[in-house]
Amino acid sequence: MGTLTKEIDKYAKNKKFEIETLKIREEYRKEFIGNVSHELKTPLFTVQSYLLTLLEGGVEDEKIRKKYLARAAKGVERLTYIIKDLDMITKLEVGVLSLDKENFDMVKVVQNVFDLFEMKAAKKQITLTFDIDYTEPIKVYADKERIQQVLTNLIVNSIKYGREKGTTEVSIENLIKNKAIIRVTDNGEGIAKANLQRLFERFYRVDKSGSRKEGGSGLGLSIVKHIIEAHEEKIYIESELGVGSEFSFTLEKTK
């Protein structure tokens, strides 16, 4: 009887855990669907309202026509970002999107991203810099285009949430014999501990107001996580509110 009681208790605990897991998944599913609906609805309504204004006579006024068509085009662009990024995440999750790995110099890739966003950073007087002068190449084995996308998302975020006259610093260090770790560190707003666990979820917002002052799909960090995990590597986040954040990820070094 004692053995039977233990087995029944074990079965009950397992079932309770399964039910709780299913509830969590259901809540996540509902939240995700709600977020997708919100993200698509906003630009759709924007495009619709501008086009309706034009159809109702606004098209006759050249100034209104140009302004409203330009705004409608921005709404369509936002929709394109969201759909393209969702498609990429789905393909990464199911393993359809294959990686095109090659040997490349990580220092050059970082410098390329710095060059792309130098003007964006300059608007907030943010300095994009390496931690030291890298005079020699640091070769890694990965999908160059995808890793550049990872760095792009991390650096754009650091600029977006960085403080005026702040700094975004990238370092490339030896972790172990065959691994390098790339760190992107800023002295910006920082992130509260309560938000760190969910930071890589699709559409998850630290800012609960729901506003997006700057463009993008809201999927950047989720894509970053999926790309790094597709390489069978790790990504880490350390942050302190009001002090800054550090995102870091590992890559295989070239032998």
Image: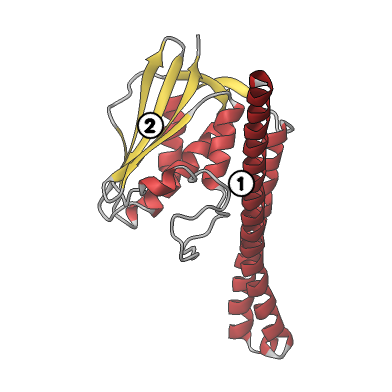
- Where residue 188 appears, as percent x and y from the top left, is 31, 49
What mark, if any, has residue 167 been given in the picture? none
> Residue 234 vs residue 181: left or right?
right
- The residue positioned farthest toward the front in the image shown: 1
Q: Name the residue under label 2.
A: 183
Say which residue appears at 66% left-offset and 73% top-offset: 45
- Distance, label 1 to label 2, CA atoms, is 32 Å
Crowd band around label 1 with a 10 angstrom C-alpha radius: few (<14), some (14–19), many (20+): few
- Badge 1 amino acid: Ile
Crowd band around label 2 with a 10 angstrom C-alpha radius: few (<14), some (14–19), many (20+): many
- Where residue 100 appears, as percent x and y from the top left, is 65, 25
Whether residue 117 is visible here, answered yes or no, is no
> Residue 195 vs residue 33: left or right?
left
Element at label 1: helix
Q: Name the residue under label 1.
A: 24
Say which residue appears at 43% left-offset and 33% top-offset: 236
Nearer to the camera, 51 or 18: 18
Say which residue appears at 67% left-offset and 69% top-offset: 44
- Where residue 227 appears, as percent x and y from the top left, is 58, 33
Q: Which of marks 1 and 2 is nearer the N terminus?
A: 1
Please say if 101 is above or below 208.
above
Say which residue appears at 72% left-offset and 34% top-offset: 94
Whether residue 190 is visible here, answered yes or no, is yes
Element at label 2: strand
- Where residue 127 appears, as percent x and y from the top left, is 29, 45
Quadrant showing the N terminus: top right
Please say if 28 is above or below 47.
above
